[in-house]
Image (cartoon, rainbow, N blue to C red):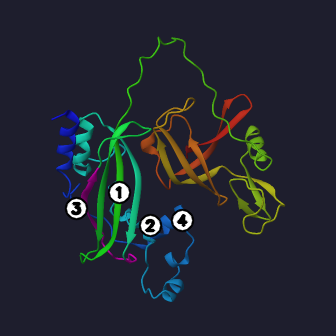
Amino acid sequence: MTEQSDLLTRAREWLGREATAATTARDPVNQAMIRRWAEAMGDANPLWHDPAARAEQGFDTPVAPPAMLEVWTMAPYRPAGRTEEEGMAVLKIFDDAGYFGVVATNIEQEYIRYLREGDVISYRTVISEISDEKKTGLGTGHFVTIDYEFTDQNDELVGRMKFRVLKFRPPEKAAAPEKDTKPKKFAHPRPAITHDNAFFWDGLKERKLLIQSFGGRLVHPPVPACPETGSFDWTTVEASGRGTIHSFVVMHHPQLPGFAYPLPVALVELAEGVRIVANMIAGTKVEDVAIGKPVTLDFVEVEPDYVLPAFRLA
């Protein structure tokens, strides 16, 4: 038996078996998470927050957007990733064989009914398919398909999901030529400056954070015309620089020249009511960054005549 066929034999022993232990949501479906999710996704459907709109559809309690199906049962966030118990043993078989690359390729979801406030969601998983070896642009690997079934507190089926990942062996790199010992300096990436956003970048050079104002209606990022009225007439307002962290991510990959990693990138809600994406100031401890924390604006001169906004914890 070849090494490849032995690998497939061991992996396919998992077909029809649970990929992970059955999991139950830590919190019931609730209005607060629905509202936060809809705000973050820009989903303005009144069904998620307006009792009158719900009543018209025959609902007497809050209901969740169907696309939140998987949200309720997600594992707790941990900087180091999932625990061993939360991992999938079938994927470790491929890891041990050198197929340690992983990328999600597609998800299909089926919604049986709306989730209502108070529902407690659980899921069960089954390994449904493991492909023969495939050659892809990322490397040679196998597609692993996991079927999820979501149920409520009464064990009633509320949705299904098919999740497919590619476990691949990264291509071997050719022997690298002898390295130049001199450290290379790379230019910092620069934005595309247009007629519509030039005022913003010019303002940063003067250590000002300028926000577009269409007759008092503030808009950011810059746009050619007011998204509500279509007006082309606008002025600018200088932001105070005070705000709170609305959301954030910590960038690890891909590592681009000119940035220090791990890199916390924040979505800051300014005191003026608009949001802006910017890096946290260099030296900010990742563990200190949290949603809701107050921040203040700073200006970083990356290169001569090139200034970026950055935020520091207040």
* Comparing labels 4 and 2, the label whose residue is closer to the camera: 2
- Where does residue 126 sit, x and y in percent of width and height? 24, 59
Return the residue nearer the eye: 228 or 126. Answer: 126
Query: From mark 4 to mark 1, how far is it between C-alphas?
Result: 26 Å
Residue visible at 18% across and 44% down in the picture: 9
Q: Is residue 67 above or below residue 180?
A: below
Say what secondary structure mark 3 lies in: loop
Q: Is residue 62 above or below residue 253?
A: below
Q: Residues within 10 Å of mark 1 (few under 14, many from 20)?
A: some
What residue sits right under mark 3 in the picture? 22
Q: Residues within 10 Å of mark 4 (few under 14, many from 20)?
A: few
Q: Which residues are magenta?
A: 113-130
Residue 77 in view, yes or no: no
Residue visible at 41% across and 40% down in the picture: 136
Residue 106 in view, yes or no: yes
The disc labelled 4 sits on which kind of residue? Glu
- Where does residue 20 sit, x and y in percent of width and height? 23, 55
Asked if disc 4 and disc 3 are in contact, CB closer than 8 Å, the reply is no
What residue sits right under mark 2 in the picture? 67
What residue sits right under mark 4 in the picture? 39
